[in-house]
Image (tube, rainbow, N blue to C red):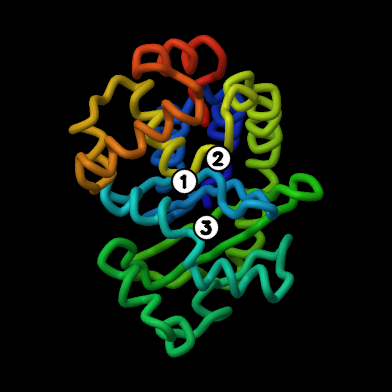
Amino acid sequence: MDWLKLYPWINDLNHCQGPAHLRALLNRLLPIVGADACLLMLIDLRRGVQHTFCAGLSARSQAFVAGNTEQDRYLHTYMSNKLVGESVCLQELLPRPKAEAGGFLERYQPYFDYRFSYGLVLPLNAHQQVAISLHRHRTPFQKLYQHDMNGLGAAILPWAHHYLKLRSHSPLAELCLEPLTPAERQVLNLLMEGLDGSEIADYRGVSKETVKSQLKSLLHKTDSRHQNQLLHRAYTLTPRFD
């Protein structure tokens, strides 16, 4: 890990302006930490993974990962072994024969084909956690990488606390009649970035009908009569960071 380049990256992360900026920062992070892909997740222990940010993945792979975190056997094994706070090599934690059980790898590999992974989950408060994982295609992570991973985890904690503070004070969150799903939050963010329904479907690798159904649900949950009203409320009431 290139610590001289990591320090200015940390400063930029703490001044992150929204999801597009965060995606750019995560892509900048990859050569700094020597990884081919990165996942950054915020977890609510009462509701599961609530936010997923990616770098090094295609749009289709990003949509698959964000929509299937509940089936992630590596994350489940990490949590069930009470490893929160520890950096671990995920393939050592869950050897391939166990990971293949139930068809997990068969479903994931077309979208997430990485042979070597290092992961860390850190607590933010009694109910929320932040998780980061780095992935490589060909080169294993060295044992000493655990130290680097711990340092990276400490670096993202201020951002995660700030993000949750924004969320807890978001009037749009209070406006919602019921919580948005991760897919609905992603659709809302893409709408706020200017994408239309067809572009959102292409980006997420789903049908136009699926996006249309999610938009209908967004209108209902935010008590909005039409898409323009939804966007007006989103721009006015909350930062573009859901």
The image position of residue 32, as x and y in percent, is 46, 46
For the residues marked 2 and 1, what is the alpha-carbon distance in whole angstroms? 7 Å
Give the label on residue 133, or none.
3
Q: Identify the residue shown where x is 35% and y is 17%.
A: 226
**Residue under pointer 1:** 32
Q: Residues within 10 Å of mark 1 (few under 14, many from 20)?
A: some
User: Mark 2 near mark 1, Cβ–Cβ under 8 Å?
Assistant: yes
Left or right, 214 with respect to 237, comes to left
Q: Earlier in the sequence, mark 3 or mark 1?
A: 1
Left or right, 14 with respect to 81, comes to left
- What secondary structure is found at the residue carrying circle 2? helix
Left or right, 14 with respect to 216, comes to right
Q: Identify the residue shown where x is 60% and y is 46%.
A: 42
Q: Identify the residue shown where x is 58% and y is 36%.
A: 178
Disc 2 residue type (three-letter): Leu
Quadrant in the rendering for residue 84: bottom right
For the residues marked 3 and 1, what is the alpha-carbon distance in whole angstroms? 14 Å
Q: Identify the residue shown where x is 50% and y is 30%.
A: 221
Disc 1 residue type (three-letter): Ile
**Outermost residue toward the right?**
126
Question: Between residues 134 and 222, which one lies in front from this camera angle?
Answer: 222
The image position of residue 148, as x and y in percent, is 61, 56
Instruction: Establish if 57 lies above or below 237.
Output: below
Foreground mark, 3 or 2, reads 3
Disc 3 residue type (three-letter): Ser
For the residues marked 3 and 2, what is the alpha-carbon distance in whole angstroms? 16 Å
- What secondary structure is found at the residue carrying circle 3? strand
**Residue under pointer 2:** 6
Instruction: Establish if 26 lies above or below 34.
Output: above
Q: Earlier in the sequence, mark 3 or mark 2?
A: 2
